[in-house]
Image (cartoon, helix red, strand yellow):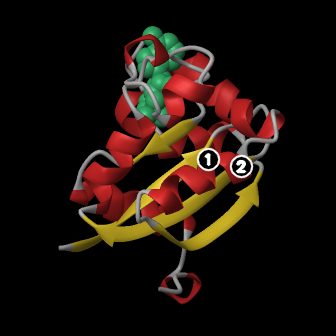
Amino acid sequence: AIERTLSIIKPDATARNLTGKINAKFEEAGLRIVAQKRILLTVGQAGTFYAVHKERPFFGELTEFMASGPVVVQVLEGEGAIMKNREVMGATNPADAAPGTIRAEFAQSVGENSVHGSDSPEAAAEEIAYFFSGLELVG
Ligand code: CMP
């Protein structure tokens, strides 16, 4: 089925001017960028977005990192987009990421791992709605 998923290009990647190279990986995999904006999150906004992780020991580090510089939030559309995006990103820890994946090529550590992608259809719907209105999604 054609799906939509929420992707974030994280501050470590925007700082290194990697937005275009990361977007090329998505497009080469057949994912279409149907919405995209560059924003600066507050720590509070990052905390709301990552609320499922709020009991984790790395929550403070995660939310401060996500607010430390610009992020590019985007909606990717395509056949099986949620799983396909996770394949293109590679494993959360770049040490475990398969060759050719975004995290294998660009990520610096498990925290500074260049990209986020929704992990389920439920999360995708919730995460897309957090950043975008329906009018901003142009397929
Ligand atoms: P992401 O897919 O954005 O979802 C939650 C994020 O938490 C994850 O990517 C990692 O970047 C981050 N994360 C997971 N484990 C750790 C950790 N041990 N230390 C710091 N950040 C982590």
State the residue position of label 1.
Answer: 22
**Is 121 positioned to the left or the right of 70 in the image?**
left
The kind of secondary structure element at disc 2 is helix
User: Looking at this view, is 62 or 54 the one in front?
Assistant: 62
Q: Residue 75 location in percent, x, y? A: 49, 66
As helix, strand or loop, the secondary structure at mark 1 comes to helix
- Is residue 108 positioned above or below 83 on the image? above
Determine the residue located farthest toward the left in the rendered image: 1
Return the residue nearer the eye: 99 or 58. 99
Q: Mark 2 points at which residue?
A: 19
Q: Residues within 10 Å of mark 2 (few under 14, many from 20)?
A: some
Q: Where is residue 117 in the image (x, y as percent from the top left)?
A: 42, 46
Residue 30 sits above or below residue 102 on the image? below
Q: In this view, does 72 lie to the left or right of 56?
A: right
Q: Which amino acid does label 2 sit on?
A: Thr
Measuring from the top left, give residue 133's x and y in whole percent. 53, 79
Quarter of the figure that contains the N terminus = bottom left
In this rendering, the answer to whether 94 lies above or below 14 is: above
Tell me whether circle 2 and circle 1 mark residues in contact (CB < 8 Å): yes
The numbered mark at residue 99 is: none
